[in-house]
Image (cartoon, rainbow, N blue to C red):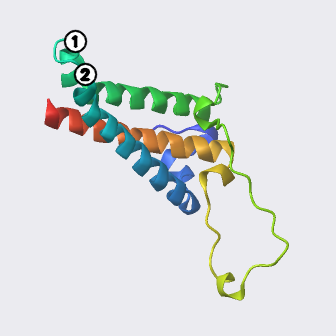
Amino acid sequence: MKTGKNGTRFRDRLQRYMLRPFIHMTFTRFLLALTAGLLIPFFLNDAAGQDLRESCFLVLTFLFALLALIAWLRLDGVKLPKLMMLRVNPRKKPTRSYGDMADWMDEEPQIVFEDLEDDEKDICLLGADLVCMIGMLAAALIVG
């Protein structure tokens, strides 16, 4: 089995607190790609887009494979720009002058993607891209 940085495997690096951002990212990316794959034939002309119409899910599969490769390279230490994580209006944490309610003392805080460290973000990106790549490949095999 292939090991990554510091001799750890991918599934060993995916911690329990990272599952919520991973599932959220996977679900939204897969639904957006599935919607785009189903809408491409609707907007393309019959003569011009026949080849792309038949293989739009395959193109999305290669796109997710490329994104997974970039995330994997970031995990290995290659410094690539993180264009996918840049946002126009980044969410700012609200400043609160009051304490938490007593009802929420025993529960763990909700972890979002922006709260993770850079390596943890790359792990979530890699896993989400791989799952979406497999889903789009399955959709390409079903449609084609």
Q: Is residue 57 above or below residue 119?
A: above
Q: Give the percent coordinates (x, y) of residue 109.
A: 65, 70
Residue 48 appears left or right of 78: left
Q: CA distance from mark 2 to mark 1?
A: 7 Å
Label 2 is placed on what type of residue?
A: Leu
Number of residue marks: 2
Graded by Cα atoms within 10 Å as few (under 14), some (14 to 19) or many (20 or more), the crowding at tag 2 reads few
Q: Find out whether the residues at labels 2 and 1 contact each other: C-beta distance under 8 Å.
A: yes
Q: Give the percent coordinates (x, y) of residue 141.
A: 17, 33
State the quadrant of the N terminus. Answer: top left
Residue 44's disc is 2
Frontmost residue, 100 versus 130? 100
Q: Residue at x 17, y 12 (%)?
A: 47
Q: Give the percent coordinates (x, y) of residue 42.
A: 23, 30
Graded by Cα atoms within 10 Å as few (under 14), some (14 to 19) or many (20 or more), the crowding at tag 1 reads few
State the quadrant of the C terminus. Answer: top left
Query: Is residue 127 in view from this perspective?
Result: yes
Frontmost residue, 69 versus 84? 84
